[in-house]
Image (cartoon, rainbow, N blue to C red):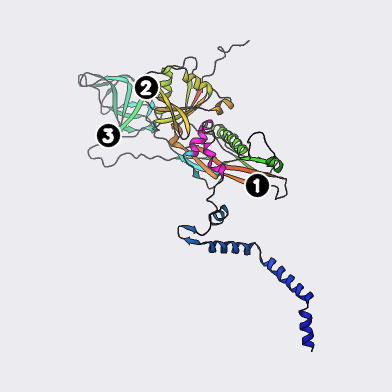
Amino acid sequence: MNNTKFFNSLFSSENIVKIILVIIAFLLWSLSAEAIDCLSTASLAVAGLVTTDNGVHLSGSPLTTSDTESVSPSLLRSEIDSRIAKIRPSATPLDQISRVGGSRKAGSMKVEYYSVDIKPGESTVTSVVKQHTYEEDSPLMVPVQNINVFAPTETVLFPSVMVTDENGMEVPLVCYVDAVNNRLQLIPANVAAVNGNIVVPEIPSGALVVRMGRAAGELDVQTSQYNALPRKNFNYCQIFKTQVEQSTLQKIADKEVGWTFSDQEEVAIIDMRLCMEKNFLFGARSRAKSVEKNEDVWLTGGIWTQAGKDFVYDAETFDNSALIGLMREAFTKNAGSTRKILIGGSGLITTLNNLSFDRVVKASEKETVWGVDFHIMTSKFGTLYVVHSEVFDLCGRPDDGIIVDPEYITKYTHIPFSAERLSLKSSGVRNSEAVVMTEASCLVLRYPDAHMRVTKKSSSPAETVTE
C-alpha cells in the first residue's frame, strides 16, 4: 500500500515536469565545448572524412573554411601576408630584395654570424731600397708595410720598377720570396746579368708589391700553409610593428568611396616597410632599456656601417671617366659578383642621369628583377642595377648611395611577418576591431668588401658661398 502511494506521488504530473527539467539541465551541462568538438568531428565523419598519410579527404558535403581551419589551420593564410612583397616594392628596394630572396630563421633576437675576406694581394715598400748587386750571400732585402701578406716560396711583382730581361726588353721586376723575416728576402728572377753581375735598380718608397703564385722546388712536398679564419660579428633583430584599428560604427557607416579595412592595412604596410628600410640602411645596433616599460628594446644595425669600401665623387666634375672609376672600385679587389645593385638618392641618380653614355659604358633599358624596376648600366668591369631610393632623400642623404652585392646579403628573421586580428569588443576594451602586423628581423653583410658606400665630396670652406 505504501509502495503504491510512493509510485503514484512519483509519477504525478508535477513530479514528471521536474524530472524532465533535470534531464534537460543535465544534457545542457554535458554539451560542453569538448562535446561540441566531438559532435563536429562526428559530423565530418558522417560527411565522409577520410584521413590518410598525405592529407585529409572530405566527400559528401561542400568544403568550408570552418572545415579547413579545423583540419589544416595553417593552410588559409592572411590576405595581408600574401601581399606583403607586392606593395610598392620599388619604394623599398633593399627590403624587397631581402624578402624575395628568402631569409634565414633566427633562434633569438641576437644574430651571430661570420664573415671573411680574401687575403690581401699587395703591399707597399716602406723605405727606399738603393740599387743593389745581387749575390747569394747578399740577397735583396725589401721592407714592406704588411709583412704578413707574404710567405716563403711565393713570387712578387714590382709594377713600377722596370728592369731589362735577358731578351733586352723593359719589364717589371719579378722576384722569388726566399724567406720572410722582418723584411722580404728576395731573389731577382728576370734581371739580365751585366758582366756577370745582377744589378737591381733602386726601389722607391711607396712602390707597390704584388703577391703572385708560389713556386715549389723539385723535392718540395709541402709548402707554407694558407688558412683563413672568419671574423665573428653580430646584429640585433628589431621587432617592427604597426596596427590598424577602426570602430564598429566606422565599419558599417556608408562611405563616398570604397575605403575598406584592407585599404587601411595596405597603407599601414607601405609605411611599415618604408620605416623598416630606413633601419635596414641607417639603423644603429643597440639594446636599450625602456624606462617607461621597464624592459629591453632591441635596435637593429643598418648595412651602411657594415659595408667595407668607400667611393667619394665630385658632382661638379663627375663624367664617364669618374663613372668607370666607380665601377672599377665596386667590382675589383673583392672577388664579389659581376652583378651588383646601386641604391641611391635623387641627387646621385641625377648625376648619373646627366652622363652621356658611350660604347665603353652603356645604359640599357629597364629590367624587372626581384619585383623592382632597375635601370641597367654596363661596363667591362660588371653590371650595375640602378634604382632610386626615396629613403636616402628622407634621411638627408640625397647625394649618397650604396652598392650592394645581392649574393652576400642575408636576412635573419626571428618572427616572420604576420597579421593578427584582435577583437577588442569581445575582450571588453573598446567597440572596435584591430589588426597588428609584426616582424622581427635584421640584415647582415657576409662579405663587407663586396659592398661600397658612395658619398658626395663635401665642399671646402673656400668653396662655400655665404650671403
Instruction: Name the disc covering residue 215, or none.
Output: 3
Instruction: Name the disc covering residue 207, or none.
Output: 2
Q: Quadrant of residue 394?
A: top right
Q: Quadrant of residue 284?
A: top right
Q: Quadrant of the C terminus?
A: top right
Name the residue located 61 percent from the left edge and 11 percent from the top edge: 466
Instruction: Name the disc covering residue 334, or none.
Output: none
Q: Secondary structure at mark 1?
A: strand
Q: Amino acid at mark 1?
A: Leu
Q: Is residue 80 magenta?
A: yes
Q: Amino acid at mark 3?
A: Ala
Vertical side of 109 occupied by 391: above or below:
above
Q: Please provide percent x and percent y for residue 274.
A: 57, 33
Q: Secondary structure at mark 2?
A: loop
Q: Is residue 119 magenta?
A: no
Q: Say left or right for 75 vs 31.
A: left
